[in-house]
Amino acid sequence: MAFTLYTLIQTAILCTNAIAVLHEERFLSKIGWGVDQGVGGFGDDPGVKAQILNLIRSVRTVMRVPLIIVNSACIILLLLFG
């Protein structure tokens, strides 16, 4: 398989899908990354763990509808052009 722009875009879509399907109560809380972990005090800089949790929540919130559209477009392109 050649390394093309399409494979790079497809890789980014797959990684975004992987982040979007992580369930906080079923998966993340079991490894210690639940809702109550990573909360600092007022004025404290958030740590790396809290920033990653915020990124996961943001991707799940913002990218839900765009991922449906992009995944559908990728499936149609793969069906048409192989």
Image: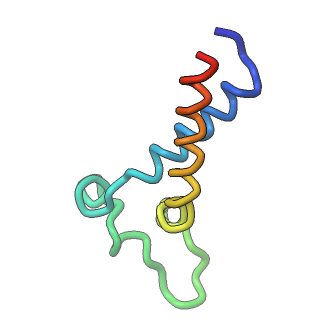
The structure residue drawn at horizontal position 45% and vertical position 44%, both measured from the top left corner, is: 18
The structure residue drawn at horizontal position 76% and vertical position 27%, both measured from the top left corner, is: 5
Residue 74: percent from left, percent from top: 58, 35
Q: Nearer the viewer, residue 55 or 38?
A: 55
Q: Nearer the viewer, residue 5 or 38?
A: 5
Q: Nearer the viewer, residue 73 or 30?
A: 73
* Placement of the C terminus among the 4 image quadrants: top right
Residue that protrudes farthest toward the right in the picture: 5
Residue 41: percent from left, percent from top: 49, 86
Can residue 79 be seen from the camera position used here? yes
The structure residue drawn at horizontal position 58% and vertical position 82%, both measured from the top left corner, is: 44
In the picture shown, does residue 62 fall above or below 75?
A: below
User: In the image, 52: left or right of 27?
Assistant: right
In the picture shown, does residue 40 fall above or below 50?
A: below
Q: How many marks?
A: 0
Residue 53: percent from left, percent from top: 47, 63
* Placement of the N terminus among the 4 image quadrants: top right
Q: Nearer the viewer, residue 39 or 68?
A: 68
User: In the image, 20: left or right of 80?
Assistant: left
Residue that protrudes farthest toward the bottom in the picture: 42
User: In the image, 32: left or right of 57?
Assistant: left
User: In the image, 15: left or right of 31?
Assistant: right
The structure residue drawn at horizontal position 60% and vertical position 88%, both measured from the top left corner, is: 43
In the picture shown, does residue 30 fall above or below 50?
A: above
Colour scheme used in the picture?
rainbow
Can residue 51 be seen from the camera position used here? no
Quadrant hosting residue 11? top right
Residue that protrudes farthest toward the top in the picture: 1
